Amino acid sequence: MDVEEVVEKVLQKIRPSDEERAFVQSLMDELKSTAEETIESLGLDVKPYFVGSLAKDTYLAGDHDVDLFLAFPLDTPLEELRSEGLKLGKAIAEKLDSYEVAYAEHPYVRARYRGVSVDLVPCYNVRDWRDVRTAVDRSILHTRWVNEHIRGKNDEVRLLKRFLKGINAYGSEIYVRGFSGYLAEILVIKYGSFLEVVKKADFILRQKIIDPADWLRREPELALKTVKRETEEDKPLIVIDPVDPRRNVSANLSWEKYGRFYFKSHQFLEKPSPEFFFPPKKERGNYLEELRKRGTALVTLLIEVPDMVDDLLFPQLERSARGFEKALQREGFRVLGWNVGRANKAFIMLEVDREKREKIRIKPGPEFFTQRGWDFYRKNTKVWLIGKRLYSEKTVRESVVEVIFELLKKNQVALGKGIRDAIKEAEVLLNYVPKELKEEAYLFLSREKWNLRG
């Protein structure tokens, strides 16, 4: 199958049908009408805006999450925006099917309507980057910029998004660190098509700075400050946000996720296949067999974490895993890799080179001229004198789990601040994981979770 055939086959799956488009349009019309009626009934000066992939027509078939932003006037105090925004979000959501309050920079409402997730997010009604007060304000500007510049390349964005999802490099969340949807849109607008972006996977990396709105000329001081900051932090890419010269759109993109894109792009061009977009589910092996084959040990900490969103939890789990890696290496264990996540409980997995370590302990004994001295002399194979006292040494075998408990007891592991107490109470398992983590343990130990050749 050549590359054009693959692209057309994938497009048939990811391009929304006419029926689906009609559903999305009616959904948005109903939500907008409900929002406007509620705003009017509360006597508020708020404008509702749809943002995100639905508003830009870059959504994938079957993916209908709605982002409805409630834009308050710029002179609204922040505390009032938070309180009134939450009150308004709840009032709208009460006319929908169900809702809950969620928390990011400020509280917002996450509702359900006609089987679709609807986020109702308060923000400021910004005209340009100078008006931006909160992290979410730019979304209105992003939607406007993409709609002005996409010029019919919507399907090309869909292809790039689906490709990034298929190779596990999509999502700018802090626990993913991949390509955001907005970054995918910018790359397609800049380079013209999905195939051109993929062909330029190495060029984009060498080019390093992408400046679609020409901020380096228009606002050189601010744009250069952004470039300098991101260069010092060794980011793989610097994409100066076309709506804000102070921001790098790819700030959360990690080297690992860019690297996946780099290798998978080359593989796709060499041997095009729909499997890059829709990878088949791999047959999972047995983690215990993998352990026996590797001759290593698996330590798993199961952690009852407080009610914490993944954006906050995962960085703290990663910090804690690195803390265990350093602490155990100081204690003579080699950590070959770590993995974190959340199933029923949060978890940290550590692969270590062995289950136990041998350790020499010096045993002080009694004075040599006593009966106890003779007993000590007869019981030990290595005995020596320091002054009047007898001494011996003993070889002990300590389990890595015992060492971990001791390190935690002595506060000798750098742990994530918000989960420190929970980790100290964690259940620690050796060479065993509960049923829900069997597949995760195999993927971790076999490195299939990150294998670039798979």
Image: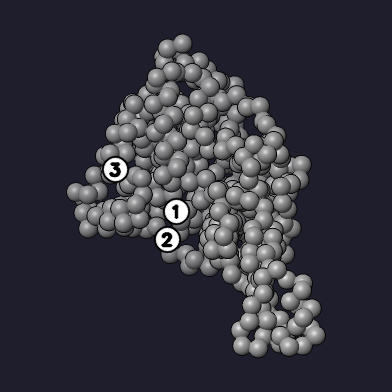
| Mark 1 vs 2: CB contact within 8 A | yes
Q: Residue at x 60, y 51 (%)?
A: 352
Q: Residue at x 58, y 57 (%)?
A: 333
- Of residue 28 and residue 20, the one placed in the foreground of this image is 20
Image position of 92 (left or right of 178)? right
- Circle 2 — which element? loop
Label 1 crowd bin: few (<14), some (14–19), many (20+), radius 10 Å: many
| Res 146 quadrant in image | top left
Q: Which residue is mark 3?
A: 208
Disc 2 residue type (three-letter): Arg
State the SS at label 1. loop
Identified by mark 1, the residue type is Asp
Residue 57 x %, y %: 47, 31
Q: Secondary structure at mark 3?
A: loop
| Residue of label 2 | 133
Q: Is residue 370 visible?
A: yes
Task: Please state the horizontal and vertical placement of residue 419, each as a whole percent of the image.
Answer: 63, 63
Q: Which residue is mark 1?
A: 137
